[in-house]
């Protein structure tokens, strides 16, 4: 009589005729003789049954059980577990093998520690016989011992990709039978059919131990793993892995009902579920032919909620995000009514972006919309929120947690449209737009600076916006030239609308009469944040120095908060070192009436910004009758047809000083400037901003706010892009060097008859790498590139 088996080896089979002999041989070669090999044929159509039957005739330890219909390896294993005579079970697939000592070593470990589960290592073998080291390392046990709820938490850690291969463990038979009893009797799982039972068993287990020995030999690529996806039918097969993890949900709920910590259990399950969804998504994207991807992703979205697919990718497989973004289409704003609008920014403070957000909130509420303001970071001033608006400061840690919070906020407030004011300043706005789209919420991107800002900052955000613009229902900019830029970049839904009046401008109202110069010292003022990068505050010292050289009696007051490393104290120290401290003074931040009083005490507003989107300080100054003297920012709609503005080339402090001196010497000309400023301010306030914003969020903005780019636009953009690129790419230095060489050579001839032309040609050559970048940036500019080069180089 054959001895009672101490370990049952359960072997599900389906069309494994070419490999099953090696598998059974490895089972019969166990150093522990008291084993049984239960082979369950799942209605194979090849010679699998014949091969197994021969083994069964030769060795009574081999048993053959046959299923009349193919019911998946999940059901085949269930049959094997029910038939097992031993107290412990090992699993092996029909194309893999067990190490000779697998049964002996794992059983000894289980008995020594009275463990429900014993984990061990795996040899992962590629099709060419090599070792798949990375996968082999991932399959190695991570814990030597676990008990109670820690078994599930350790084997399926929250936030990490789930590993549910049951052939990595020795199981106590009764525990397996209890686990199967919690799952549907007729459950058929064609894909990822081992994870459900592994997960439920880990959920029920009281103890786990492991050893580092690699006791299983897994042949990577023989089965379903690592295979290319050539048809939609194949993709549908792989996507059925999602059914496998969903099948566990009732069992998890049943156990959670009696669990000491149901929240932890449910969180664990949700993590595993998302991990499987992310795995399926990534696998399909990696192994599907490119031309089939769109159809495959469409099917995937029918298998799992879109927001779960996004969250799964963010948490576990971020490489899949780009494909998900590319697969998304913007939501048509005209498809449904808008009742609730979310406005979002980094923090709600006193800055320009916050001012726009607050003004938009007031205008949209006045138009009858429900408004929610969301700050993505800490540090906001909630007292600034207008009455009637809801304010939320996000608290989540990590992108995945914050995206869940984003969805919760949208659903809590029934948000229809999001206006995202961080698109030009954030690297993760596409993920927020993607997750919003997954729940049917449209996102509008709102840009607060000139389109060349990312070039000046060298932060790569142009490519980010271009690549992900399809996630935005509309991309709102602040000028027609910005629209031209983005349309040339391939973003057809670009529009522009002016910024709303700042709270200060609304409080100031427009002065009734122009200012006049008195026979006294000229008072100049600058206000904003002390931002050297974009506002070039140290250029104010250059202007002051040149004014001193022009013998102008003046005083310049700098008003505004410290910014990064620049403080009022540092600025004043620098002024003192240059002997300008009696002419220039930074006085720190002023608000409310104090700021109004400072503006009204001034004669001229001076601004030295190198880049702006919609400089509200210009409108604020002009509303009180102050003429504006500035470095040229030609795209600003505020300065176009504005006779109250005097502009000079960027960085030309001497020209700025000369122009100020000219007007300071003529009271009549100064008053004309002041009058023109008041007219410009009144014009800015005539826009029906509430109506404009309503048209933006409903997709009904008139076409005049989305003009098509012209060749003139392209020329101007090319000059500006090169200018801002020069600030960081050294082209300007190359041009200066070329000019010096031209002057020192003194040569004139057929090839150097025009020093200016030679200089421009050298600059063009120096700018060639930038030119390539420009053409990448503006694919629609390519037909115009030669004409632009001809005009720049003169040939």
Image: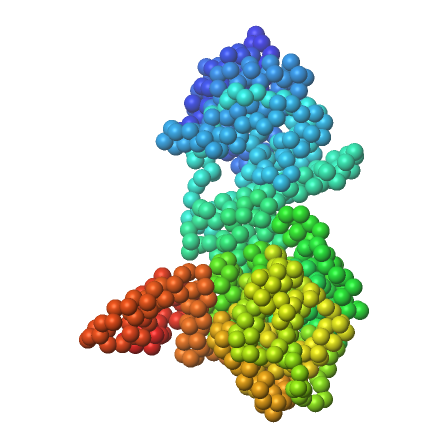
Look at 64% across and 74% down and name the residue there. 555
Q: Name the residue furthest bottom.
A: 668
Look at 60% across and 63% down and name the residue there. 576
Q: How many marks?
A: 0
User: Does residue 204 appear in the picture of this structure?
Assistant: no
97 relative to 568, above or below: above
Look at 48% across and 73% down and name the residue there. 652
* Near-viewer residue (790 or 331): 790
139 relative to 31, above or below: below
Look at 72% across and 68% down and name the residue there. 590
User: Does residue 669 appear in the picture of this structure?
Assistant: yes
Q: Name the residue furthest left.
A: 750
156 relative to 678, above or below: above
* Residue 117 falls left or right of residue 546: right
* Residue 785 falls left or right of residue 490: left
The N terminus - image quarter: top right
* Near-viewer residue (157 or 75): 157
The C terminus - image quarter: bottom left
* Residue 750 falls left or right of residue 522: left
Name the spot of residue 544 as percent of width and height, x first.
57, 72
* Near-viewer residue (275 or 528): 528
Name the spot of residue 253 as percent of width and height, x first.
73, 40
Quadrant for residue 709, please give it.
Answer: bottom left
540 relative to 4, above or below: below
Name the spot of residue 459 as percent of width and height, x first.
50, 58
Name the spot of residue 529 as percent of width and height, x first.
64, 65
Quadrant for residue 563, please give it.
Answer: bottom right
Q: Name the residue furthest top.
A: 1
Q: How is the image coloured?
A: rainbow
* Near-viewer residue (158 or 632): 632
């Amino acid at each position: 009589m054959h001895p009672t088996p101490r370990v049952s080896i359960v072997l599900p089979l389906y069309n494994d005729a070419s490999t099953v002999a090696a598998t059974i041989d490895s089972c019969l070669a166990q150093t522990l003789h008291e084993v049984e090999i239960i082979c369950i044929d799942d209605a194979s159509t090849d010679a699998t049954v014949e091969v197994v039957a021969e083994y069964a005739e030769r060795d009574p330890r081999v048993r053959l059980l046959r299923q009349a219909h193919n019911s998946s390896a999940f059901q085949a294993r269930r049959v094997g577990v029910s038939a097992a005579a031993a107290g412990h079970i090992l699993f092996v697939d029909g194309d893999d093998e067990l190490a000779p000592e697998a049964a002996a070593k794992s059983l000894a470990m289980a008995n020594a520690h009275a463990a429900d589960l014993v984990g061990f290592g795996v040899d992962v073998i590629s099709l060419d016989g090599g070792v798949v080291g990375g996968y082999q390392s991932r399959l190695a046990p991570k814990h030597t011992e676990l008990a109670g709820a820690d078994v599930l938490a350790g084997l399926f850690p929250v936030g990490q990709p789930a590993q549910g291969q049951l052939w990595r463990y020795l199981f106590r038979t009764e525990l397996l039978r209890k686990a199967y009893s919690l799952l549907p009797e007729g459950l058929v799982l064609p894909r990822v059919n081992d994870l459900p039972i592994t997960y439920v068993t880990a959920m029920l287990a009281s103890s786990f131990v492991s050893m580092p020995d690699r006791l299983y030999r897994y042949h990577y690529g023989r089965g379903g793993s690592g295979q290319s996806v050539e048809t939609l039918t194949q993709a549908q097969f792989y996507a059925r892995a999602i059914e496998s993890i969903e099948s566990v949900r009732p069992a998890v709920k049943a156990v959670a009902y009696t669990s000491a910590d149901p929240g932890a259990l449910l969180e664990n399950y949700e993590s595993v579920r998302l991990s499987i969804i992310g795995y399926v998504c990534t696998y399909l994207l990696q192994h599907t032919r490119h031309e089939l991807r769109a159809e495959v992703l469409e099917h995937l979205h029918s298998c799992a909620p879109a927001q779960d697919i996004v969250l799964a990718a963010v948490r576990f497989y971020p490489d899949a995000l780009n494909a998900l973004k590319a697969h998304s289409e913007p939501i048509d704003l005209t498809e449904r009514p808008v009742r609730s609008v979310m406005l979002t920014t980094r923090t709600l403070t006193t800055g320009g972006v916050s001012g726009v957000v607050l003004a938009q909130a007031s205008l949209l509420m006045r138009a009858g919309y429900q408004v929610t303001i969301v700050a993505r970071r800490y540090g906001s001033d909630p007292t600034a929120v207008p009455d009637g608006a809801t304010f939320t400061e996000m608290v989540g840690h990590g992108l995945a947690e914050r995206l869940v919070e984003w969805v919760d906020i949208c659903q809590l407030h029934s948000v229809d449209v999001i206006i995202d004011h961080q698109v030009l300043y954030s690297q993760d706005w596409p993920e927020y737009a993607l997750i919003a789209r997954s729940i049917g919420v449209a996102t509008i991107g709102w840009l607060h600076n000139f389109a060349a800002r990312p070039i000046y900052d060298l932060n790569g955000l142009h490519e980010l916006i271009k690549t992900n613009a399809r996630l935005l229902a509309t991309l709102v900019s602040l000028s027609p030239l910005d629209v031209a830029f983005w349309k040339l970049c391939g973003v057809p839904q670009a529009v522009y609308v002016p910024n709303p009046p700042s709270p200060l401008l609304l409080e100031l109202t427009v002065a009734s009469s122009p200012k006049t110069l008195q026979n006294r010292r000229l008072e100049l003022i600058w206000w904003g944040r002390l931002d050297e990068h974009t506002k070039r505050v140290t250029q104010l010292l250059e202007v002051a120095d040149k004014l001193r050289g022009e013998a102008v009696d003046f005083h310049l007051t700098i008003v505004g908060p410290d910014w990064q490393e620049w403080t009022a104290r540092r600025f004043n120290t620098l002024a003192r070192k240059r002997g300008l401290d009696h002419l220039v003074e930074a006085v720190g931040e002023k608000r409310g009436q104090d700021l109004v009083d400072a503006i009204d005490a001034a004669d001229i507003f001076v601004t030295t910004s190198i880049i702006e989107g919609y400089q509200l300080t210009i409108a604020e100054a002009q509303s009180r009758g102050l003429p504006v003297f500035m470095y040229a920012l030609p795209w600003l709609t505020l300065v176009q047809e504005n006779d109250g503005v005097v502009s000079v080339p960027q960085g030309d402090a001497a020209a700025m000083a000369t122009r100020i001196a000219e007007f300071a010497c003529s009271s009549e000309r100064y008053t004309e400037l002041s009058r023109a400023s008041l007219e410009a301010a009144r014009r800015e306030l005539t826009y029906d901003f509430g109506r404009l914003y309503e048209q933006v969020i409903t997709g009904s903005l008139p076409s005049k706010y989305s003009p098509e780019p012209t060749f003139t636009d392209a020329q101007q953009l090319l000059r500006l892009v090169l200018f801002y690129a020069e600030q960081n790419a050294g082209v300007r230095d190359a041009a200066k060097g070329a000019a010096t060489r031209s002057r020192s050579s003194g040569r004139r001839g057929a090839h150097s008859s025009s020093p200016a032309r030679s200089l421009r040609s050298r600059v063009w050559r120096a700018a060639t790498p930038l030119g390539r970048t420009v053409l990448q940036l503006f694919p629609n500019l390519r037909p115009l590139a030669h004409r632009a080069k001809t005009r720049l180089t003169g040939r």
